[in-house]
Image: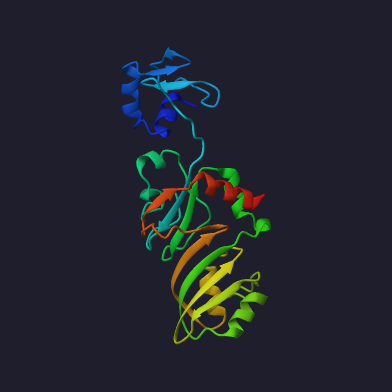
Amino acid sequence: MRLDKLLSNMGFGSRKEVKKLLKAGSVRVEGKVVKDPSIHVQPELQNVTVHGENVEYKPFIYLMLNKPKGVISATEDMEHETVVDLLAFEHALYEPFPVGRLDKDTEGFVLLTNDGKLNHELMSPKKHVKKTYWAKVRGVVREEDITAFKAGVILDDGYKTKPAELVILTSGEISYIELSITEGKFHQVKRMFQAVGKKVLELKRLSIGPLALDDSLETGMYRELTEDEVVLLKNHQA
């Protein structure tokens, strides 16, 4: 890894700011002053210091974001704000990407990481990772819908969904529910309710696998996962 990229990723400033540190002789690799920003280092094996302090290398980043409506689950887009646009500079430098997608008009838990292996594990259909949503639905949601969702419903393209767990919070002309699914077809939650004659008015993702969205995160805010949360998420896929 280039030395300037390493230092930028570890929070020592932009590439331009890092070059100033290097020029000033503040950076040492294996005890020797290095001023060349393009030099390649092995942070797992070599000792790198800035102003005498060790640089602790962190190869991966894991972020829990409470996505607002109107923001798309992508790394870049010419027309719309993306989840990556919401990140601070020191986190965006890791070039994280959203794990899966959350519809533009859906809010809630989006996991962002640059850990490709974990992304593959979470997205693999074989893993059956559960995702739970809260929804406001137009129409009376009944016990028969719970039964239908558990058996799998036929979507508008003929696809039969895998068993899903529907919990009715309140039922009426406007109903409130929680739904847990283990797959992620396009607009799946909305299409499932459409299949039983109802319409989703609002949708929010509450959890991914064993991790629930932090209640303290306001819409548009995010935080890094704790070490325990990362371990929990990885062990869940084992």
**Extreme-top residue of the structure:** 32
**Extreme-front residue of the structure:** 228
The image shows residue 45 at horizontal and vertical percentages of 55, 23
Q: Please indicate whether residue 223 sits to the left or right of residue 230 in the image.
A: left
The image shows residue 90 at horizontal and vertical percentages of 38, 39
The image shows residue 115 at horizontal and vertical percentages of 55, 43
Please say if 116 is above or below 108.
Answer: above
Q: Please indicate whether residue 43 sits to the left or right of residue 125 in the image.
A: left
The image shows residue 36 at horizontal and vertical percentages of 40, 17
Give the residue at x 39% y 53%: 82
Q: Foreground: 46 or 113?
A: 46
Q: Foreground: 155 or 140?
A: 140
Tell how many labels.
0
Give the residue at x 44% y 27%: 55
Q: Is residue 76 shown to the viewer in this render?
A: no
Give the residue at x 35% y 26%: 18
Q: Quadrant of residue 12?
A: top left
Q: Quadrant of residue 214?
A: bottom left
Please say if 1 is above or below 183.
Answer: above
Q: Is residue 98 shown to the viewer in this render?
A: yes
